[in-house]
Image (spheres, rainbow, N blue to C red):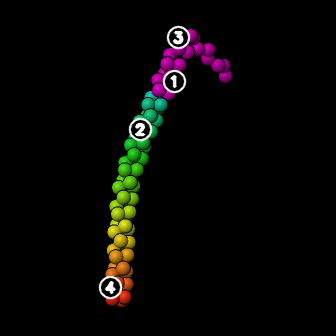
Amino acid sequence: MEKKTLTNAEMAQTNDVNHNEVIGLLMEIRQQNADQLSRIDELERTATKRGAVAGAVAGSVTGGVMALGIELLKAKLGM
């Protein structure tokens, strides 16, 4: 089989098509990265809120247990 020799114009046209395909694919990748970054940002916000709520609940429960313990000791010692 003989290889077909492309003219300069045909080569330029082929390169333009290849470049356009590559640029299109790169634009898709950029959009996918942007979507993932926005999802990560949302997950960070959600995790921060949940962590704050969990910390507040744990602190409240611990404070209540400590207050109850102190009151029980006061009652036992007659204070």
| Residue annotated with mark 4 | 79
**Furthest-front residue in this view:** 79
**Furthest-top residue in this view:** 8
CA gap, disc 1 to disc 3? 14 Å
**Furthest-right residue in this view:** 1
Residue at image coords 36%, 53%: 46
- For discs 1 and 2, the disc positioned in front in the rendered view: 2
Quarter holding residue 1: top right
- Residue 16: x percent and y percent? 49, 19
Note whether 20 is above or below 46 in the view shown: above
In terms of secondary structure, where does tag 4 sit?
A: loop
- Type of the residue with mark 3: Ala
Residue at image coords 53%, 11%: 9
Q: Residues within 10 Å of mark 4 (few under 14, many from 20)?
A: few
| Residue annotated with mark 1 | 18
- Residue 41: x percent and y percent? 39, 46
